[in-house]
Amino acid sequence: MGSEAPSSPEWTTKAVLETLPHPPESNSASPVPFFHLLERLKTTKREGWRRFGISHGESISDHMYRMSIMTMMAPPSLSAKLNIPHCTKMALIHDMAESLVGDITPVDKDVTKAEKARREAAVMDYITKDLLGGVPGGQLSGPEILRVFQEYEDNETLEAKFVHDVDKMELLLQMVEYERTHAIDLTEFCHVAQRIQLPEVQEWAATVMKEREAVWKSIRGN
């Protein structure tokens, strides 16, 4: 009988930390180790674009920064129902786990949705307890970060639904910008527009998709 191929070891936060040249110090009374971890969000690229040859594309923090500004631009019909500062906070926190997990995309078939969620939950547990557990809370504490992250994951509050929509909207913006700059067809990402739920964000998306039509007319010389 042939021997079975050995299975890959289970992904753990500890294993990833051991690969870092300068892993953050745990159980510190200072937030500085956490600040250093956030640098990884600045240098880790969003993977979806790399498959299309865009090697110097946006980072995870680039994506979250524009999202955070977008949350503050909610039109009056929507902002009147939302806690906007909370939405902005959620936009800045929602991908924080990718500092160690990396940007796992739907085409990464080796990592299931459940496994992605497990990894992200493990990293958020590490961040909020090992890195920030001993740090005196100001406007933001470990438990608060974890609450906001979980609210986004549960996607039940209006704030979470709005931030999920903004996440998709930011992707559509970046899609059109890369198409215009690189003359590359990124139609694969257009389906995201159909998954936006709130009418106000749907209106934003419709504007971008109309803009995309003009971009491609220009590229094709029509």
Image (cartoon, rainbow, N blue to C red):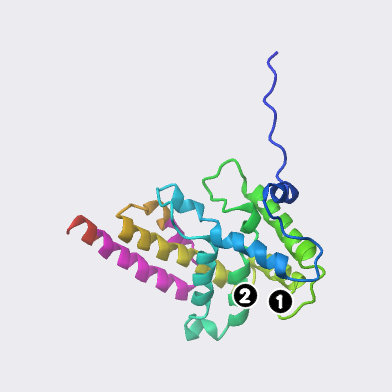
Report which residue position mark 1 lands on: 140
Main SS of the magenta segment? helix
Q: Name the residue type under label 2.
A: Lys
Q: In x, y percent, where is residue 76?
A: 49, 86
Instruction: Kindly report which numbered mark, 2 or 1, lies closer to the viewer in this rendering.
Output: 1
Residue occupied by mark 2: 89
Which residues lie in the magenta part? Answer: 191-216
User: Which of the image's four quarters has the N terminus?
Assistant: top right
Q: Are marks 2 and 1 in contact (CB under 8 Å)?
A: yes
Q: CA distance from mark 2 to mark 1?
A: 9 Å
Residues 21 and 80: in front is 21
Q: Residues within 10 Å of mark 2 (few under 14, many from 20)?
A: some
Q: Earlier in the sequence, mark 2 or mark 1?
A: 2
The residue that appears at 63% across and 78% down in the rendered structure is 86
Indicate yes or no whether the magenta region holds residue 50.
no
Q: Position of residue 113 (x, y in %)?
A: 62, 49
